[in-house]
Image (cartoon, rainbow, N blue to C red):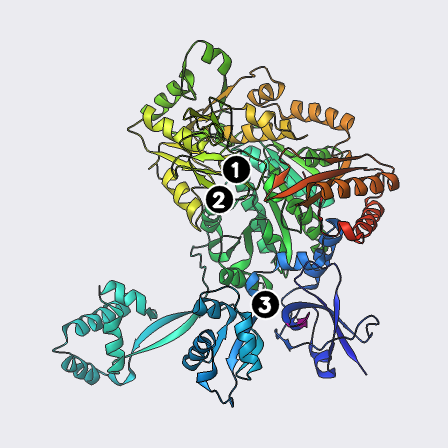
C-alpha cells in the first residue's frame, strides 16, 4: 500500500503537490499540519498538508517528505477553505495566499549549511588563500552559512571556492531547516534554599559584611519580595538597586542567589475588566437595538453614523454580548495608526482579553498571537488588527467588525493575494456562521448600494454623541485670495486667523495635505527641465530636511542639484507643496508653538505612530500637519480647527472614484474637529468653491453625493453595476510589452462579449525600469462572474504558453477599487 499527502507550497504556484509518506505517518498527519518537503534540486520548504490519500500521481514520482513539523494542526479547515476561496475569487495562486497568511516565522526555508567532513585529511599547503580562510573558520565553529562565507571572503561569488573544497573532499553541504520562532524566556531570581531559615539569614549577612554592593542588592531583594509578594526578575532587581548584572552574577557564583527562567508572552496587555455598565445615549441605544434586530434576519449590517457619533461605544456593547456567548471577536481597522488608540479604549473595558495583530509586530510576537487565537486562549478573545488579521486561525469566531469600511487600505495592492479585507471578511463570516458589522461615516458606494437594495441591514445615526454640533465648514476661494494678495505662502488670511484664535484659546489644530515631502517637483526657470527618476516615469519629490530629491515609487534619491542638469542654469524653483513645506511655513508664522508632522516619513518605526499620537493627545503639540493618516477615526477632544490646505488635488485625480474619495476624505478630516462640547470649525482652501463635491461636504450631504455618483456609475459602466478586473502587464522591453499587451487584448475582446478597455498606458507608465500596460474588463452583474473568470484564466494560460511573451509579468487585480 502506498500513502501520500497533498500539500500547498509557499510559492507562487496555483497547484498542490503530492509527496509520499509511510503508513505510520499517514495515520499521524492531519489536515492543517506543516511538513518540511524537498522541492527542486536542493531546496526544502515548509508545506501545508491539505489532505492525505492513496492516489499515486501519474505525471511525476512523488518524493518523500523530510519531517513533520507540528504535533497538532496549526491551520484550521475553515482557514484552508477560506484561502481557497480567496485564491479562486481574486485569481491568484493558492501558494501566494498561504505565504501571505502565515507569519513568516512559521514558514521555515532551507538555509544552506557548510560543515567540515569529520574524517577528512587536509593538506593545508595545497589550499589557495580563499580556501584556507574557509577551512580556518571551520576549525573555530562547526558549521557556516553561505552568508558567513560571503563575509569571510568579502566577495559575492563564493560558490567556486566552496565547490573546490567539496571536490577535494573536505566539505559537505547539508540543507537544514531552522525553526525561527524562539519563545521569550525571562530570567528570574530567588534566594538559595540554604538561607531560608533565620539562622541562614544570620550566616548570609555575616558572609557579606565586607561586600557592600552585594549586601545592598540582597537588602533590595528582601524589600521587593516583601512588598510585591511575587517572583522577581533579575532586570527589576538590578534596576531598583541601581546596580549591575555583574554583582548579581557574583552572588549566583557564591550560591547565595539562584536564577531560573520562565517562558512569557512578548505582548501583554494589563488591564482590569470593567464592572460598571457602559451608558449609551438615546441615539446610540436606538442604533444598538436596530443592529441586533437586523442580525435576526441578515448576516451583514451597515452602521452609517456621522463622525463622532460614538460608534465605538456601540461596538463595545455588541462585543460584550458575543463574549458572554463564548465567541471570539475580530475587529478590523484600516490603519495601524488607529490600533494604538483603540487598544487603549478596549483594554479599559475588557482587560487583557485583547490581542493585536499587524505588520509592525515582530515575527515572534505574531506567532504568539497566532497560537493564542488557535487555542481560543483567554488573551485572544478580541483580536484587533489590520487586514492581515483576517487570516488568523479562529477557533470560534462569532462577530466581525470592519471599522471605516470605506477605506481603500483594506484592499491589498501588491503582492498577491490582492484581496479586499471587507469582502473577504463577509465570506469568512459565512464559513463561521458569524455576523459582520460594517461601520463608517462615509460608506463606500458599493456597500451603501447593498444596504439600500436590502442585501445588508442598514442602521443610521444622524447626530453626534452628547449632542455636540457638527463642525461649521467655511470655504476659502484661493483664486480670489491670491488676486487680493491675502496669502502668506500657502496660508490664506482666513486660515491664519483661525489658527491664531484656536491657539490663543489653548486649543489644537490639525492641517491636512495629501502629499508628503517638501514639494512634488523642482523646475528650472530657464529651460523648464524637471529632474525625473531614472527608473520610474515620475518627477522626483524634494525633501528639504534631507536636502535630497526622492522617488516615492522605488526609493531612488539624489542630492538636491545646485544647477539645472539640462542647461546648467542656477535658476531652480520648487513647484507644489507637501507636508514638510507646510511645517516649515508654520514655523515661521507661529515660531512660539510646537508643530508636529504625521506622514510616512515620520512614522517609520514600530512605535512611530504612538509617539506622535501620544504627544498630540497630551497637548505637547499645538498644530499637527499630516497626510491621509489623520483622516481615519482618530479621537482628539481638544481639536477645534481643521484646515484642508488644498482640496483640489484629490478632486482631479484620474480615477472613477475621485469624487467619492474626495468626499470621504474631506468629511473624515472635518470630523476630527470639535469632538467635545464646543462646535468645531473646518476651513477648506480650494480653487473651485462651487464644485458639487465640495458643496456636498459643506452641507454634509452624503445622500446627494451617493445619488449623483450612482447615476454616473450606471452610465459609464462602473461598480456597483459592473464588476471590474484589471490586468497589469510589465516588462523592461517597451516594444515587446506593447506587442504582448495587444495580443492579449485582442484574444480577450474576441472571446468575451463584454466591455474590454485597453491596452492602456497608465499615468505613470514606468516603475523600477519596467514599462506598464493595463487592460480593464467590465463584467455586468447579470453575467456569471465564475465562468467569465475561468475564460479569462484560460486566455492568460495560453498567453503564458507563447514563448516570446513568457517573460512579461502579468498581475490580475479583481475589484481593484
**Residue 228 appears in the rendering:** no
Q: Mark 1 or mark 3, which has the lower sequence index?
A: 3
| x 38%, y 37%: residue | 545
Residue that protrudes farthest toward the top in the picture: 484
Residue at disc 1, secondary structure:
loop
Left or right of 214? Residue 347 is right
Q: Are marks 1 and 2 in contact (CB under 8 Å)?
A: yes
Residue 470: x %, y % from top left: 51, 25
The residue stretch that appears in magenta: 38-42
Front one among 667 and 121: 121
Residue at disc 3, secondary structure:
loop
**Residue 302 appears in the rendering:** yes
Question: Which mark, residue 337?
Answer: 2
Rendered view: 749 above or below 685: below
Q: Which residue is mark 1?
A: 632
| x 37%, y 26%: residue | 585
Q: Mark 2 or mark 3, which has the lower sequence index?
A: 3
Residue at disc 2, secondary structure:
helix
The mark closer to the camera, 1 or 3, is 3
Residue 546: x %, y % from top left: 39, 39
Question: Which mark, residue 461?
Answer: none
Rendered view: 95 above or below 341: below
* Quadrant (top left, top right, bottom left, bottom right) of the C terminus: top right
Q: Main secondary structure of the magenta part?
A: loop
Q: Which residue is mark 3?
A: 109
* Quadrant (top left, top right, bottom left, bottom right) of the N terminus: bottom right
Spatial separation of the CA atoms under disc 2 and disc 3: 32 Å
Residue 595: x %, y % from top left: 36, 33
Residue that protrudes farthest toward the left in the picture: 210
Front one among 513 and 303: 513
Q: Quadrant of residue 71?
A: bottom right
Amino acid at each position: 500500500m502506498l500513502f501520500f499527502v497533498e500539500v500547498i507550497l509557499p510559492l507562487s504556484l496555483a497547484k498542490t503537490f503530492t509527496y509520499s509518506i509511510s503508513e505510520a505517518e499517514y495515520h499521524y498527519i492531519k489536515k492543517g499540519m506543516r511538513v518540511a518537503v524537498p522541492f527542486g534540486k536542493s531546496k526544502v520548504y515548509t508545506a501545508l498538508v491539505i489532505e492525505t490519500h492513496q492516489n499515486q500521481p501519474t505525471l511525476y514520482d512523488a518524493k518523500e517528505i523530510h519531517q513533520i513539523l507540528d504535533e497538532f494542526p496549526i491551520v484550521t479547515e475553515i482557514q484552508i477553505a477560506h484561502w481557497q476561496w480567496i485564491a479562486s475569487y481574486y485569481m491568484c495562486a493558492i501558494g501566494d495566499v498561504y505565504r501571505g497568511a502565515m507569519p513568516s516565522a512559521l514558514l521555515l526555508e532551507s538555509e544552506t549549511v557548510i560543515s567540515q567532513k569529520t574524517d577528512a585529511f587536509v593538506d593545508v599547503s595545497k589550499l589557495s588563500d580563499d580556501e584556507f580562510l574557509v577551512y580556518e573558520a571551520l576549525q573555530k565553529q562547526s558549521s557556516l552559512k553561505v552568508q558567513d562565507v560571503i563575509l569571510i571572503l568579502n566577495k559575492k561569488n563564493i560558490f567556486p571556492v566552496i565547490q573546490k573544497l567539496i571536490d577535494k573532499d573536505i566539505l559537505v553541504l547539508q540543507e537544514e531547516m531552522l525553526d525561527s520562532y524562539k519563545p521569550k524566556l525571562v530570567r528570574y531570581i530567588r534566594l538559595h534554599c540554604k538561607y531560608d531559615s533565620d539562622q541562614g539569614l544570620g550566616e548570609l549577612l555575616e558572609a557579606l559584611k565586607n561586600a557592600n554592593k552585594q549586601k545592598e542588592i540582597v537588602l533590595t531583594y528582601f524589600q521587593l519580595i516583601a512588598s510585591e509578594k511575587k517572583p522577581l526578575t533579575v532586570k527589576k532587581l538590578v534596576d531598583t538597586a541601581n546596580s549591575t548584572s555583574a554583582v548579581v552574577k557574583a552572588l549566583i557564583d557564591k550560591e547565595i542567589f539562584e536564577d531560573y527562567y520562565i517562558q512569557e508572552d512578548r505582548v501583554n496587555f494589563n488591564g482590569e475588566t470593567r464592572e460598571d455598565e457602559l451608558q449609551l445615549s438615546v441615539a446610540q441605544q436606538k442604533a444598538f437595538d436596530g443592529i441586533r434586530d437586523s442580525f435576526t434576519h441578515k448576516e451583514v449590517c451597515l452602521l452609517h453614523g456621522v463622525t463622532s457619533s460614538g460608534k465605538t461605544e456601540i461596538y463595545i456593547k455588541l462585543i460584550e454580548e458575543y463574549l458572554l456567548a463564548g465567541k471570539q471577536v475580530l475587529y478590523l481597522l484600516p490603519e495601524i495608526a488607529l490600533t494604538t488608540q483603540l487598544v487603549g479604549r478596549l483594554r479599559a473595558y475588557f482587560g487583557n482579553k485583547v490581542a493585536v495583530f499587524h505588520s509592525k509586530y515582530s515575527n515572534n510576537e505574531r506567532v504568539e498571537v497566532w497560537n493564542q487565537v488557535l487555542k481560543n486562549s483567554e488573551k485572544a478573545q478580541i483580536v484587533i488588527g489590520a487586514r492581515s488579521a483576517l487570516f488568523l486561525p479562529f477557533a470560534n469566531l462569532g462577530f466581525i467588525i470592519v471599522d471605516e469600511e470605506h477605506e481603500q487600505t483594506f484592499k491589498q495592492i501588491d503582492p498577491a493575494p490582492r484581496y479586499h479585507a471587507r469582502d473577504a471578511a463577509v465570506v469568512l463570516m459565512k464559513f463561521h456562521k458569524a455576523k459582520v458589522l460594517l461601520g463608517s461615516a462615509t460608506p463606500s458606494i458599493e456597500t451603501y448600494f447593498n444596504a439600500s437594495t436590502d442585501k445588508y441591514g442598514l442602521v443610521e445615526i444622524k447626530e453626534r454623541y452628547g449632542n455636540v454640533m457638527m463642525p461649521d465648514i467655511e470655504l476659502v476661494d484661493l483664486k480670489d485670495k491670491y488676486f487680493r494678495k491675502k496669502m502668506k505662502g500657502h496660508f490664506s488670511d482666513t486660515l491664519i486667523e483661525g489658527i491664531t484664535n484656536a491657539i490663543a484659546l489653548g486649543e489644537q489644530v490639525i492641517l491636512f495635505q495629501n502629499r508628503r515631502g517638501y514639494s512634488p517637483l523642482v523646475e528650472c526657470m530657464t529651460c523648464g527641465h524637471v529632474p525625473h527618476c531614472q527608473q520610474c516615469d515620475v518627477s522626483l519629490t524634494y525633501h528639504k530636511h534631507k536636502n535630497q530629491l526622492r522617488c516615492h515609487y522605488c526609493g531612488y534619491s539624489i542630492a538636491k542639484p545646485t544647477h539645472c542638469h539640462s542647461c546648467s542654469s542656477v535658476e531652480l524653483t520648487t513647484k507644489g507643496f507637501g507636508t514638510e513645506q507646510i511645517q516649515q511655513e508654520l514655523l515661521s508664522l507661529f515660531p512660539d508653538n510646537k508643530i508636529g508632522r504625521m506622514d510616512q516619513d515620520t512614522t517609520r518605526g514600530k512605535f512611530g505612530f504612538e509617539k506622535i499620537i501620544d504627544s498630540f493627545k497630551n497637548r505637547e503639540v499645538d498644530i499637527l500637519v499630516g497626510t491621509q493618516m489623520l483622516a481615519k477615526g482618530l479621537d482628539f477632544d481638544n481639536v477645534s480647527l481643521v484646515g484642508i490646505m488644498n482640496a483640489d488635488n484629490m478632486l482631479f485625480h484620474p480615477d472613477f472614484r475621485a469624487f467619492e474619495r474626495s468626499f470621504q476624505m474631506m468629511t473624515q478630516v472635518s470630523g476630527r474637529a470639535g469632538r467635545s462640547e464646543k462646535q468645531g470649525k473646518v476651513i477648506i482652501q480650494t480653487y473651485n468653491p462651487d464644485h458639487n463635491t465640495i458643496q456636498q461636504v459643506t452641507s454634509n450631504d452624503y445622500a446627494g453625493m451617493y445619488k449623483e455618483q450612482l447615476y454616473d456609475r450606471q452610465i459609464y459602466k462602473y461598480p456597483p453595476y459592473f464588476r471590474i478586473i484589471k490586468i497589469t502587464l510589465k516588462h523592461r522591453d517597451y516594444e515587446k510589452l506593447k506587442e504582448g499587451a495587444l495580443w492579449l487584448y485582442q484574444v480577450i475582446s474576441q472571446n468575451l462579449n463584454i466591455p474590454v478597455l485597453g491596452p492602456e498606458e497608465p499615468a505613470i507608465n514606468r516603475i523600477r525600469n519596467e514599462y506598464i500596460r493595463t487592460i480593464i474588463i467590465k463584467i455586468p452583474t447579470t453575467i456569471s462572474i465564475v465562468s467569465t473568470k475561468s475564460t479569462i484564466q484560460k486566455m492568460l494560460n495560453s498567453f503564458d504558453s507563447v514563448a516570446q511573451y513568457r517573460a512579461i509579468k502579468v498581475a490580475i487585480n479583481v475589484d481593484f477599487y
